[in-house]
Image: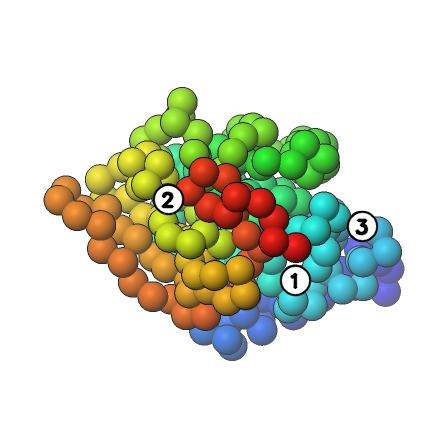
C-alpha cells in the first residue's frame, strides 16, 4: 500500500469513528472524507493526520480535533448556499471543510504566518470560494456582513457583540465560551427579536485575542 492509499484508508477510518461518536450529517462526514488533513500539517506529523486529536501548527496554535471540527460544522446546519464567517483560520483545514459545504467562506486570522500558510495550502488544493484576511477576530469582518453562519475557532469570555451584530436573522453562530482553561461550546441562533443559546458540551480551545476576547495570550 502506498502513502496515498494508506492516508485515504485512514481518512475513511476517521469518518467511521466520527459516525460512531455521534456525527450524523452525511454531508459533513463526506466533506471530512474529501479534505486531506495531512496537507495542513507539517510533513513529520503525517502519521497522526487522522488521529482523532488536535495537533500543533506553530505560533502556539493547534489544528482542532476532527470530532470537534465535525461537531461544530454539523451544528451550523449548512445546506450549501450559505455565506460563512470563520474566526481563526489557523491551518486552513476547517475553512476547507466549510468550503465543501457552503457557497462562500470568509476567514480571518490575526497571525500573519498562519494566514500565509493557509493561503498557500488552500490555493494549492483548488479552493476558490474562500476569502482570507488578517484581522482581529473578535471584530469579525464587517465588510462582508451579514453572514448566514459564523464559526469561532478560539475561546472567548462571552459571545462578542460584534459577531452577533454580523449574524443574519435566522443565522447560527458556534463559539467556545469560558475561561482560558475550559469552555462550553455554544450554539447561538439569531431570531427576529433575540439570541437563543444552546450548550453543545465541554471543549478546550486556544484563547480568542482582541477587544471582546482576551487582552493578550495567557500562554
> In the picture, which quadrant includes the N terminus?
bottom right
Q: Residue furthest top?
A: 143
Q: Mark 2 to mark 3: distance in Å?
A: 32 Å
Residue 199 seen in the current view: yes
Q: Is residue 184 above or below residue 153?
A: below
The image position of residue 130, as x and y in percent, is: 54, 32
The residue closer to the viewer here, 110 or 130, is 110
Kindly identify which residue carries mark 2.
160
| Extreme residue toward the left, this view | 193
Q: Is residue 199 above or below residue 142?
A: below
Q: Residue at the spot x=65%, y=62% of the render?
A: 54
Mark positioned earlier in the residue sequence (2 or 1) = 1
* Nearer to the camera, 74 or 118: 118
State the residue position of label 3: 42
The image shows residue 176 at horizontal and vertical percentages of 44, 57
In this view, 199 is above or below 173: below
Query: Residue 110's quadrant in the figure?
Result: top right
Residue neighbourhood size for the residue with mark 2, other residues' Cα within 10 Å, grouped as few (<14), some (14–19), many (≥20) = some
Crowding around mark 3 (Cα neighbors within 10 Å: few <14, some 14 to 19, many 20+) is few
The mark closer to the camera, 2 or 3, is 2
Give residue 158's position: percent from left, percent from top.
Answer: 37, 52
Mark pair 3, 1: CA separation: 13 Å
Specify which label sits upstream in the sequence, 2 or 3. 3
Residue assigned mark 1: 54
Q: Which residue is nearer to you in this view: 152 or 14?
A: 152
Secondary element under disc 3, as helix, strand or loop, is: loop
Q: Nearer the viewer, mark 2 or mark 1?
A: 2
Amino acid at each position: 500500500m502506498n502513502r496515498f492509499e494508506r492516508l485515504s484508508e485512514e481518512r475513511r477510518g476517521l469518518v467511521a469513528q466520527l459516525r460512531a461518536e455521534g456525527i450524523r450529517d452525511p454531508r459533513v462526514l463526506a466533506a471530512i472524507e474529501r479534505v486531506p488533513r495531512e496537507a495542513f500539517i507539517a510533513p513529520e506529523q503525517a502519521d497522526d493526520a487522522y488521529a482523532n486529536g488536535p495537533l500543533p501548527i506553530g505560533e502556539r496554535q493547534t489544528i482542532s480535533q476532527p470530532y470537534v471540527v465535525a461537531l461544530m460544522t454539523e451544528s451550523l446546519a449548512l445546506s450549501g448556499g450559505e455565506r460563512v464567517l470563520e474566526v481563526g483560520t489557523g491551518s486552513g483545514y476547517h475553512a476547507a471543510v466549510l468550503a465543501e459545504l457552503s457557497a462562500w467562506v470568509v476567514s480571518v486570522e490575526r497571525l500573519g504566518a498562519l494566514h500565509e500558510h493557509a493561503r498557500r495550502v488552500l490555493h494549492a488544493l483548488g479552493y476558490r470560494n474562500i476569502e482570507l484576511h488578517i484581522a482581529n477576530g473578535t471584530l469579525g469582518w464587517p465588510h462582508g456582513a451579514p453572514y448566514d453562519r459564523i464559526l469561532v475557532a478560539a475561546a472567548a469570555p462571552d459571545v462578542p457583540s460584534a459577531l452577533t451584530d454580523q449574524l443574519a436573522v435566522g443565522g447560527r453562530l458556534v463559539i467556545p465560551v469560558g475561561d482560558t482553561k475550559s469552555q462550553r461550546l455554544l450554539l447561538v441562533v439569531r431570531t427576529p427579536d433575540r439570541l437563543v443559546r444552546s450548550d453543545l458540551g465541554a471543549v478546550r480551545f486556544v484563547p480568542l485575542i482582541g477587544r471582546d476576547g482576551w487582552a493578550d495570550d495567557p500562554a
